[in-house]
Each structure stands twice: as structure tokens, then as C-alpha cells.
Amino acid sequence: MHNENTSKGVFNTPNPKTLDLLLNRRSVKARDMVGSGPDKETISQILQAAMRVPDHGKLAPWRFIVLEGNEKEKLGDLIAEALQAENNASETVAEKMKGYATQGPVLIIAVFSPSSARPIPIWEQWLSAGAACQNMLVAATALGYASQWLTGWASTSRHVAKGLGLCEHEQIAGFMFLGDHPEEQPTERPRPEFDKQVYFGFPEA
């Protein structure tokens, strides 16, 4: 399962196609994904890429829960239960929200799991978790699969977190949906203007 180059200690091999992928990657709405999505071996490759991110202190402040098939329906039930428990939502609203978890073929729950083993600021650990999620999107695209990173109310619910076995200090960083590409490819969305976001040189006072 390990990449042959990295297992031999060959790193940072130039690959111009990677830049093209980064400049053209586009999220696909989970509800539009088709097919069965990546198999277990491919999911493992995507997660290996997720774990090769900057990680100050080597704390690995993230972990992942993979849900497929009926397991996603269990999450849907948990979300509905949480809505009623925390928000006093009606049964109708709660029932509708069950579909959130079953939008795409495969769901990887990225869990932010900070560590106090070393004095690394919490915000740096959050950045590492975010990088892991981004690596998943890039890896999935590189392997020919559609992907989308979602958060929303369920990602902050302690009822949902507890139901997934998260500890008190852990939090859901994202619901990462993976699947096959739909027949219609996604269109481009508005992007920030380069000159408004980038300044070359030391900023003037």
C-alpha cells in the first residue's frame, strides 16, 4: 500500500501535472455523486495522503472514521436524534436531515484530535487537520474521484460527537464525501482576484 518512491526514501519528485490538478480541482456536490465510489484500497491511499501533512511536533492531531453503505444511515439517525435533543426540532425536520449523511457513496469523518503531549498551539494543530482534509480532496481528484468537504451544524453537535465515540477534547473537522463523477461536470465558481489577495514585498506602514 505504501508509495514505492517514498518507501525507498525518494521525496519531492517534480511533477508539473500536480500543479495543473491544483489549479483545476473542483468540488462536486455530494448529492450529485454517482456510483459506488472508491474501494477500501483506494480509500486507504487517500488517507495515507491525508496523513502526509505539516504537523508541528509530530502530534498527528487528527483521525478518521470511514462510513459506507448502511453505516451512513446510522449517522443519519444520530443526526436526527441530535437535532431533537439539542434543538427541539420536529420529527419532520429531523427525518429530513437524515439524508445529510447519505448524500455520497463514501463518507470519511475527519476528526480533530488535539494533543497536549508537546506545547504546540491549538491553532497550529487545527491547521494540520485542515491540511489533512485538503490532501484528501486532492488525492481523491488525482485518483479520478469526486469529492466534497462539508461541515454544518452536525460538525459542532456534541450529541453527534458523543455518538461517534469522540472524546470531549475532539471535534469533527469535516464530513468528506467521496464518489464517482456525475455525468455533468461541475462548473467553475467565482474565485478571488489574485492582485487583491497577493502583495509582493514588505508591506508599507
Image: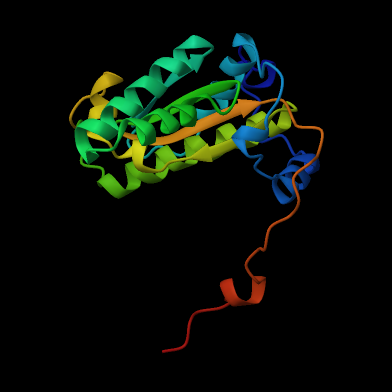
How far from the left and from the top, in percent, is residue 28?
66, 39
Q: Quadrant of the C terminus?
A: bottom left
How far from the left and from the top, in percent, is residue 159?
23, 29
Residue at the farthest bottom position: 205
Report which quarter residue 139 is drawn in.
top right
Which residue is drawn at the image coordinates 35% and 37% (left, top)? 155
Side of 119 where 27 appears, left or right: right
145 and 127: which one is in front? 145
Side of 137 where 67 appears, left or right: left
Side of 106 where 171 appears, left or right: left
150 and 184: which one is in front? 184
Q: Quadrant of the N terminus?
A: top right
On screen, 61 above or below 205? above
Judging from the image, the colouring scheme is rainbow
How far from the left and from the top, in percent, is residue 166?
26, 23
How far from the left and from the top, in percent, is residue 130?
44, 42
Report which quarter residue 129 is drawn in.
top left
Query: Can the viewer see residue 98?
Result: yes
On screen, 196 above or below 91? below
Query: Can the viewer see residue 114?
Result: no
Side of 161 where 93 appears, left or right: right
Which residue is drawn at the image coordinates 34% and 28% (left, top)? 79
How many numbered marks appear?
0
Report which quarter residue 7 is drawn in.
top right
